[in-house]
Amino acid sequence: MAIEWYVWPDDDESFYKIIHKPAGKMWGAFDVIGSKIHPMGDFDNGIVPDLNEPHRVYQTRKGYRVFYTGRFNPPFVPTLHEMWDQGADKSYLKNAKHRKYYAARVTPKYTDDLVNNPGSSYSIVKLVYDTGDAHPGWTAFIEAHDQLTNATGQSELIV
């Protein structure tokens, strides 16, 4: 079941949740996969941080999504500060700090993309590369994310 306007409770040890975000002024309703133990960053500036650790990079509509797969449940706020220094999207980081979890969109945000391209298959992200040995705690999360986003499919659009 999807959850609206969710702030992660301090005592909730769930691995991840699917969270429903209501429509905003500029976009429609969409879902995100959220986790407070799987660090992931949003890099809308088109630059992938130079990481010397296991990680997974996805192309998004505006830039890149990075999973820090060598880390599992690292200290939350220091990890956000590190992402800040690496050039992650500032709005994403501020929202993550407020809601107490990392999040990645898994459904379309803009319905115009689908209306204007009828019959096209789409992905939310496309896997660009995966490097290093991921912590085993990432396995189920990556499987859920990649299935929900069609990250490894042969789709025509990234929406």
Image (cartoon, rainbow, N blue to C red):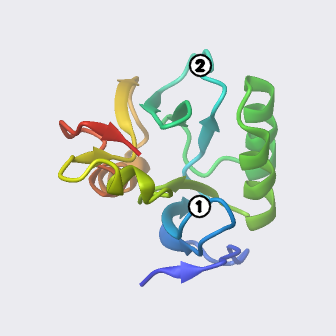
C-alpha gap between disc 1 and disc 2:
32 Å
Mark 2 or mark 1, which is nearer the start of the sequence?
A: 1
Mark 2: which amino acid?
Answer: Leu
Instruction: List x then y, in percent, for residue 92.
Output: 71, 48
Q: Is residue 146 above or below residue 56?
A: below
Mark 1: which amino acid?
Answer: Trp
Q: Is residue 93 toward the left or the right of residue 69 in the image?
A: right
Q: Is residue 151 toward the left or the right of residue 35 in the image?
A: left
Residue situated in front as seen by the camera: 11 or 96: 96
Instruction: List x then y, in percent, for residue 10.
Output: 73, 74
The reply to whether residue 109 is visible in this rendering is yes
Crowd band around label 2 with a 10 angstrom C-alpha radius: few (<14), some (14–19), many (20+): few
Q: Which is in the foreground here, disc 1 or disc 2? A: 1
Taking the view exactly as shown, the residue that stands out farthest to the front is 116
Give the residue displayed 39% in from the left and 47% down from the top. Answer: 124
Judging from the image, what secondary structure is the residue with disc 1 in?
A: loop
Number of disc labels: 2
Instruction: List x then y, in percent, for residue 132.
Output: 40, 23
Give the residue displayed 56% in from the left and 60% down from the top. Answer: 35
Residue situated in front as seen by the camera: 50 or 78: 50
Mark 1 = which residue? 27
Splitting the image into 4 quarters, where does residue 97 fall? bottom right
Residue situated in front as seen by the camera: 21 or 129: 21
Mark 2 = which residue? 51
Instruction: List x then y, in percent, for residue 112.
Output: 43, 55
Judging from the image, what secondary structure is the residue with disc 2 in?
A: loop
